[in-house]
Amino acid sequence: RDEFLDEMIRHDGLGDETLPLKCSGASCENEAAYRCLDCFDRHLKCANCMCIAHQHHPLHCTEVWNGGHFEKTTLQSLGLTIHLGHDGDPCPYALPKLDLVTVIHTNGIHTVSVKFCECPWSSLPRRTQLLRVRWWPATVDRPKTVTTFAALDLFLQLTLQSKLNMYDFYLSLEHLSDNTNTRNLKYRYKEFNRCVLECRHLLSCKRSARGHDPSGIKATQEGECAVECPACPQPGRNLPEGWENHAQDQRYKYALFLAMDANFKLKSKDRGIRDAPLGDGWGYFVPSVPFKEHVSKYIAQPEMNTCGSQLRAVDHANLRSNAKLLVNGVGGVNCSRHALNRRIGFGDLQRGEKFANMDFCVLSTLHDVEVTTLYLSYDIACQWFVNLPTRMEEYPYQLQVNPNLVVIVAIPKLHLVGHGPKCQTIYSFNFIPGSARTCGESIEQIWSGQNAVAMSTREMSPGSRQDTLDDHLGAWNFRKVTDLSLGKQLLALLREAVPMQVLHGNVFKQFSASLNPQHILKWRQMVTAWHADNTCPDPYSQPFSEGKSLAKAKLELAKQEAVDASAGVISPHEISASTFLSSGLELEEQQRALKVLVSNASAKSDVQAAEIQQRRNALKHRIDVWRKVQGVYMPGVSTSLQDRHPSLDEQSEPSNSELSELYLPSSLALAVRAAVAPGLAEKELCLRLAQADDCIHQLRRNLRIRANLWRYKVFNSTGQKANTRTRVVIDRFQGKINRHVEGYRAARLALLSLDPNGKWTERLQVLNSDDIRGPSRDDGAELSGRDRTSEGRHVAPWIWHITIASESGESVDEMNDDVRVEWVKTAARVDRWGEEVTLVCEEMRRTLAFLEWRAVWWMSQANRRVASQSVDGLAIELGLQSGLHAYALKQAATQRALAKRFAQLWVPFL
């Protein structure tokens, strides 16, 4: 640190210069006192040599040695004069008086002496002379302030990347020139602002080849200055011939995917200024005049909310957040697959998210769309789209779309959870054929990028604000393409989609193989009918039902015993064998419940200890009563207990009755099991199968309930009191889930003992902790967690793939709804991943085709303006013609270079 600090301080002195100070200029013996801070040569020079050395570097910063230290000076004060119009040579007709011009440059703000060319036969306007040396004049007649092209480029790059506002940038330049505020710098912020606005506007015209059009800038069409998405379908540019003749089930390959939304951070204060944008309607914002005329007709347009949820966008559509605001927000449209902004797809919101404003934005960008299929996502699509055709009947021609356009609306996946039950399936991208793996949330990415300029644009006049936002929206599109973000995104999508298509395809095949083909046929027909008519029964919705399997098993055993009794088979006890076994299973469940109670009361109070002891006593009494019946059906077990404990009437059982072994047939060795009553083990097998089915059913049911409670907690419970209350209820159901898990595991352990190689092993699998979750990806307690998989990536646990019907068979109508729902969702996942692979490959092809088309288009612009043509009466001289030709060739080369880089990125994977 000391070394670096010393070197920094060293530059404040003379360094290696020795007294007396001599000029370092060639053959100059004058005394030296000046140095340049921008030249690599830091040797001192005299004033004359300093001016000679800076004839072509007039904006370098200089210092003078005053005998004790260096202080700032200017080249203008040393006598440097800039001559324009003759390549730096003086004009013989120049006026004798020097013009002082303020120059805003990247290294500060300078005052320079300028002499303009005044040749009577060939002199150019002063503004043109300044532009020829890359100085942008703030005025056009007698400019006194200019900004260098370098300063404009620097600011535009900084503001587009870091969202730096213009005022802070200008102050930074002032501080570079006078950080101590001891010099009287002229305040030229307004002039700098004007230069930036003009340069920003004309740069967009230049980049869209408006300078190559013989008709000039005035002939610019709506949206012509926008950067378009190369991956979106554009007939005549990147679609193959005959694309319109594709099959119905392949229409998504050439469909346009758009997303629309509103942003209420991009506000604008009402400062009483009503300036017009310089490129009104040429970029991303809709033309302001027709837009204002349109929305003025629907000031009090009512917005009805019929969704099963509270939609703020609808309820607050006519509310203004602040009377001092001219604009309350911005509505916009972008391509939902690639997150590029749509041309003439953005507009201001004077109040809330009114349909009239949003209609104008989306219909304007769709007016000249030639594709025949559109997937459109909107967070309130369930309300907005209902009466759109009716509203369009009142709109002018400019807001009409292709009558053959098929519009499929959806709700973005993240917003869908806030909607009512019907919206969850009808407007879900997961279930819409042809939607691939589109999420619909891309518009939110745009807002996150534009919100950084919200604080600066809200203070601007309306015209400046619109031009500024247009520039930032265009920069977003440009960077998405040139930074290869689009290419990397498509590659990442394809890298994921290919293996996921295989994975879910295999899951679907295995799942379908375990089901009755008749059921599958019925479900397929149900899905087809629902997609054709959403009023048909929804195959993706899941009703809840109570499990009855164990009760049915008990009933069947009781009926069988009744048949046996009528046939003369006498039961050895008044309590039947099935009732005895059922009581044993109930005692097991009571033991598990008591174990949970004991474990939850680790630090027992007197009240808790008393309750536990009372429950232990009651359970022990029930076990003692059950033991007496056990002695009839299982005499070997009874004898074994008698040998160890002489009297069952004494306190022979363990003091903790929840730990007592019940010794049901499944827990006995084969030799001991042979001594129990005939058929007892077979009856336990029947009951254990029913118990396992019942536990799975109840586990499913309580997992569903837990998921609903978590949703309620996340979206409805506010405040500590409400959250605590909900959490208590959730914990109660979590306890039930745990008991059903333990019950299933106990039943399966018994089944392994009773029938280790039975057919049941194909259906009733090991229940791991990861299996204890709902079939949907948001059906777990981790509802708000970051590690949740999406619906398309989700693979449901095996508990949702099996049926819990009885072995005797049942009708199709009694088939478990959980299985049907998961099967149709699994089928939808396979379809979406397959569509994703196809669509991403098509998007890659379209991107390369568009870039090649764009390169050819730029080549065609090179010679549009020939020497004999003119724009606004100005003849086109050879220098301009050379620039037009070179710029067109450069742009064409850039398009082809981008295409090459995209191809190099994709080909290794393809």
Image (tube, rainbow, N blue to C red):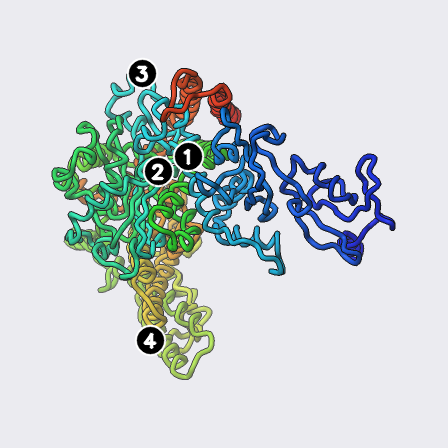
Dot in front, 3 or 4:
3
Can you tell which of label 2 and label 3 is closer to the viewer?
2
Residue at (57, 54) in percent of width and height: 185
SS for callout 4: helix
Marking on residue 618: 4
Could you tell which of marks 3 and 4 lies nearer the N-terminus?
A: 3
**Amino acid beneath label 4:** Ala
Location of mark 1 (residue): 204
Q: Which numbered disc, 2 or 4, marks the residue that appears first in the sequence?
A: 2
Relative height, residue 178 to residue 618 (above, below): above
Labelled disc at residue 440 = none
Marks 1 and 4 close (CB-CB < 8 Å): no
Distance CA(mark 1)–CA(mark 4): 85 Å
Q: Nearer the viewer, residue 179 or 361?
A: 179
Of all residues, the one furthest to the bottom in this rendering is 606
Name the front one of labels 2 and 4.
Answer: 2
**Disc 4 packing (10 Å; few <14; some 14–19; many ≥20):** few
Residue topped by disc 3: 241
**Percent coordinates x, y for residue 650 in the rendering:** 40, 78
Give the SS element for disc 3: loop
Q: Residue at x 17, y 55 (%)?
A: 562
Mark 2 in CB contact with mark 1 (< 8 angstroms): yes
Q: Earlier in the sequence, mark 1 or mark 4?
A: 1
Q: Secondary structure at mark 1?
A: helix
Asked if one can make out residue 333 in the rendered structure from this viewpoint, the answer is yes
